[in-house]
Amino acid sequence: MKFGIVLKLFLLTTTLCLLITGSIYIGQTIFFKQYYANRKVNDLKSSIKSFEKQYLKSDGNVQTIQQLEQDFYRAQNTWITTLDHNGNIKTANDFYAEIRIDGNKKSNQILMIPLYHLLKEDDLLKDTPPISKGDIVDVNIIDKNNITIPYYLYVVQRNSYWINQSMWKNIDNSFLVNNEKYDIKEKMEISPKYNAEIHQLKGIVQNVRIPDRNDVSSIIYSNILFMDRINEFQTNLLLDEQNQHKTFKTLDYEQNGIKYKLFIDPIKDENGETNYIFSMASLQPVDEAVRMVKDYFVYIIAFVLLLTILASIYYSIKIARPLLRINNTTRKIAHLDFSERIEYHSKDEIGDLSQNINLLSNTLHSHITQLKQDIEKEKQLENTRKEFISGVSHELKTPLSIMKSCISILKDGVASHKKDYYFEAMEKEVDKMDLLIVDMLELAKYESGTYKMKMEPFYIDKVIDQICSQLSLEIEKKELTIHKDLVSIEVFANQHRIEQVITNYMTNAIRYSPVHEHIYISTTIEDEQVKVCVENKGSHIPNDQLNKVWERFYRGDTSRHRSEGSTGLGLAISKNILDLHGAQYGVMNTSDGVLFYFCLNKNK
């Protein structure tokens, strides 16, 4: 079964799109969450290290540190703050209460407690402050190593209480003996496990600082979950001496199905004490994105199918149709039909292929045409060869017959008084045969294609004058008049071979000119060439034989001119010499004669 290219491309595109879609789905649902978490953790580690450097340069300036925290949150969308060696927020100087303690050994002592352990964001947003100056309060604290941490605050006038849940849970499980609805004993014994004291104190609020909700420093207080993690970290830091953080740690935390990453970076301050950079990042965005992707993949698959159909239509128009056209054209080329061309001009591989096929078609057509011409030429050469052999046989037959007759006469002793005459006749025939053979060899040399012309500059008018002087006897013998109209100009050609051409032209003109006629020789300048013309008066060449004058053994009058020593090869030799020069040449009948001409390049 034969499948079309459009169907194949459709199946290939569909398979490829589905594979890509499936790979994306698997990657996003399985690997992307882990990749995102690892990438975010690594990026946040680098950002926290950068924050650490800037923090150390701040020299403990609270406003600078708060601004660094704010900038970090905006850049990373991650909560961050700095804690002292006890786990207290270092920038919490705007969120505290001063309480004067009454009674017992803590009497009249001013106790400053941070309120971020107890109060939440909802408490800060109320119109009435949760605690004010002059309020009577009950406060429960943990006292360890002279560190006071509140975990319970009760305001008598408002009948309101607040609890540090993280600390409360540890105390509740570890050392509270009587606990009913936050009814705490006034005094607790020292815990052997934590080496800490727990006290219930009474006092009066002397001063309260609650941050403005628009204040930069209040941003971390608004995140209850972040504050709970800080409290939990502080509880573990104070109550569990084995849970000390010496190196950078990353912890996992999950709340209500949302995963978080906690970063704890211990650093040394200028006093050599260990401080902490505490940060929390939510991984909820990637979970939401993965859930959204799962729901959205139904639409993605539908879009992929639509895209595949559109791609198939595009393939059909832009790829399949040109390929089918190329296939039809190449089929015609295979049957030697070069008439059709592919009209496709796009700047891509198919466009290049179309141009190459058109070029191939033109080349094949040219070569096949040339081959046909070569075959015709070969046939013509074969015919010429046969004519040549026939002509040579004919040319050699006559002198051989004459020589045979002369030898027979001399051998028989007939007309012995004419012995010198017959020897002279045989010598003339030998000279004619020698001339014929020399011309044949020279013609073969030119036609072999291996002969190279050596070009040189020379004056054409001087060459013509010299040839006229050499042929003066033949000219005077027929009482001819030579008319010369020559321009003194230098041409670039092979002087010896051009002399041979002019000599053949002149000899031919003398031979075919009647007695007492005129021969005209002229040179004219035409653009960058010099035209040489030789015209003899008194006779014409039949129009049907004008193109034959360049052939071997052509003679206008065979019997008469053979007796004058013509081999019939002079103009054929001239033709080959001029062809080797790449020169234009020709012959034409004039009003009362015949004109032979050729053109040569001027010397630059």
Image (cartoon, rainbow, N blue to C red):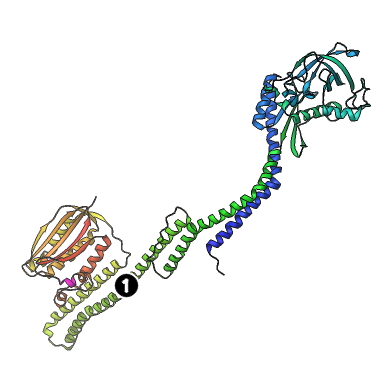
Q: Which residue is mark 1?
A: 376
Q: Residue at x 63, y 54 (%)?
A: 19
Where residue 108 sits, quadrant-wise, is top right
Residue situated in front as seen by the camera: 425 or 523: 523
* Percent coordinates x, y for residue 333 in the rendering: 42, 67
Extreme residue in the top direction: 108
Residue 39 sits above or below residue 6 on the image: above
Q: Residue at x 67, y 42 (%)?
A: 289
Q: Which residues are magenta?
A: 541-545
Residue situated in front as seen by the camera: 505 or 26: 26
Where residue 358 sits, quadrant-wise, is bottom left
Residue 241 in sight: no
* Percent coordinates x, y for residue 378 in the rendering: 33, 73
Q: Is residue 331 left or right of residue 550?
A: right
Q: Main structural element of the magenta stretch: helix, strand or loop? A: helix
Q: Residue at x 44, y 59 (%)?
A: 354
